[in-house]
Image (cartoon, rainbow, N blue to C red):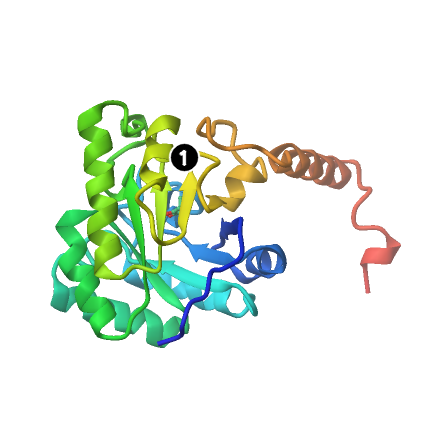
Amino acid sequence: MKKINLKKRPIICLTSYSKFFAEIADEYCDIVLVGDSLGMVYYGDPSTRSVSLNDMIRHAKSVRSGVKKAIMVVDMPYRTYSNPTLAKKNALRIMRETKCDAVKLEGGKEISHIIKHLIKNRINVMGHIGLLPQKVRSKKDYKIKGINAVEKNKIINDLKCIQESGVFSIVLEAVKNHTAKEVMKFSKIPIIGIGASKECDGQILVLEDMLGMFKKVPKFVKKYSNLRSYIKKAVKQYSKDIRDKKFPTKRNVY
Ligand code: KIV
């Protein structure tokens, strides 16, 4: 079990599903997450629930070949950790086949016994609380959390439970700013925000979201590029060149 050391602040994290993007993320990030957002971002599914263990392992192997220095975390897909025995079997398979440093599980108090079991078996675990994408069936059901005292107390309780179980870090997703700030007061381990407060110890975004590959993104995404329009422009020019007999040229043939 690799000892995970996250002393540096802020902790910079991004997702990756393949070697090409992982190599770039690895240069600038402390954590590279092979997220099960893979299902929605890469395969165009309505939720993350359709992602299989085989999908995650295939992509994580590709990411592994691009990550040399960052901590590499792999999401355990929906229904692959419903009980301690199943979770251990699947987590060990992910660790063995992808050589990742840790796995990430979504949930709070209700899965703290599963997290404990994995850690007892020398598997590093990252937690994920607040909005839990695996509980959501379609994009329209994404709703921010921590909007009232009941929700805030639930998130704080979830944090305490999984922190106690031994996770090395926790992703806090889509919670009200004031709730996230309150949650931070109870944290003893690094909290990585996505649509949470800038007070978090670190931040994570889905790489394709911040690159501007999608027309619609959640409010918490800042687009650092507009890759969609660059790709569109290039593809349009390519099709025009072929139609106008400008491609291939002498330089492109043997
Ligand atoms: O699956 C994923 O990409 C994630 C991040 C949004 C944190 O869990």
* Left or right, 116 with reference to 133: left
Does ligand 1 reach within 8 Å of label 1's beta carbon? no
| Residue type beneath disc 1 | Ala
Give whichever of 44, 148 is nearer the camera.
148
Image position, residue 184 (x, y; %): 36, 41
Q: Point out the image quarter for the N terminus.
A: bottom left
Question: Which of these two is toward me, 220 or 10?
Answer: 10
Q: Between residues 180 and 238, which one lies in front from this camera angle?
A: 180
Query: Callout 1 environment at 10 Å: few (<14), some (14 to 19), or many (20+)?
Result: many
Q: Between 35 and 110, which is closer to the camera in this rendering? A: 110
Residue hosting label 1: 196
> Where is 111 relative to 142, above or below?
below
Q: Where residue 64 sits in the image (x, y, percent)?
A: 49, 68
Would residue 212 appear left or right of 92 to someone viewing this image? right
Point 19% across, 51% down: residue = 161
Q: Quadrant of residue 102?
A: bottom left
Quadrant the C terminus occupies: bottom right
Image vertical order of residue 49 relative to residue 104, above or below: above
Say if residue 20 shows up in the picture.
Answer: yes
Direction top: furthest residue = 148
What residue is rendered at 46% in x and 46% in y? 201
Q: Is residue 88 left or right of residue 243?
A: left
Residue at 37% x, 60% y is 74
Q: Quadrant of residue 97?
A: bottom left
